[in-house]
Amino acid sequence: GSTWNEARNRLYAEVRGGASHYRYLVFLDEDVSLSLRPSAVDAPGVQEDPWREYERLLIEWAPAVGVPRYTVQQPEEEDQEEPDVQCVHFMDPLVVSIHFEAAALLLPYTNH
């Protein structure tokens, strides 16, 4: 077995040498699922598959670190407008995408 950090560091080690053709390193837990927020389902340009929509937003906005919005980050009122992106104020590493150019600054994870 291995720890969560050890496993993700191993994946990072596999790609860091010659995988600059990847734009993002996407780390996720095996049981994660994504869904589109209700207001985005029929919006123009939004991908039907939630994973493809997440990928589209990463490509469009190109953050150093990207994470999907979690349920706890939804607006308190249903009719409140939701931005496509926002600053992260809560980050659970269930899904985290690290831009390849930022990876050397942020990885590897510590194993203490």
Image (tube, rainbow, N blue to C red):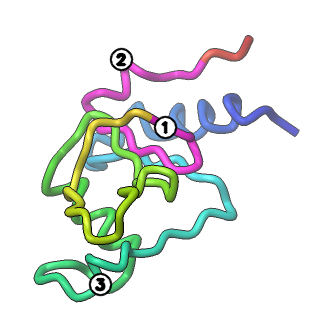
Furthest toward the right, the residue is: 1
Residue 102 rendering spot, x and y as whole percentages: 29, 27
Question: Mark 3: few, some, or many residues within 10 Å (few <14, many ≥20)?
Answer: some
The residue where tag 3 is placed is 41
Asked if residue 83 is positioned above or below residue 78 in the image, the reply reads above
Q: Who comes first in sequence, dot 2 or dot 3?
A: 3
Vertical order, 55 against 14 (above or below): below
Q: Secondary structure at mark 3?
A: loop
> Is 97 in the magenta?
yes
Where disc 1 sits, the SS reads loop
Residue drawn 15% across and 49% down?
A: 61
Q: Which circle, 2 or 1, is nearer the viewer? A: 1
| Residue corresponding to mark 2 | 105
Q: Does the residue at mark 3 contact the one at mark 1 (Cβ under 8 Å)?
A: no
**Residue appearing at x 33%, y 73% in the figure:** 52
Which residue does the image show at 62% across and 15% down from the upper left? 110
> In terms of sequence position, does the residue under pointer 3 or pointer 1 come before the other?
3
Quadrant in the picture for the N terminus: top right
Residue 63 in percent (x, y) is at 23, 40
For the residues marked 3 and 1, what is the alpha-carbon distance in whole angstroms? 24 Å
User: Of discs 2 and 3, which sits in the foreground?
Assistant: 3
Amino acid type of the residue that numbered disc 2 sits on in the rendered structure: Leu
Q: Looking at the picture, which amino acid does disc 1 mark?
A: Met
- Asked if residue 72 is among those painted magenta in the image, a careful observer would answer no
Provide the residue designation for mark 1: 91
* Highlighted magenta segment, given as a residue range: 90-109
Q: Amino acid at mark 3?
A: Val
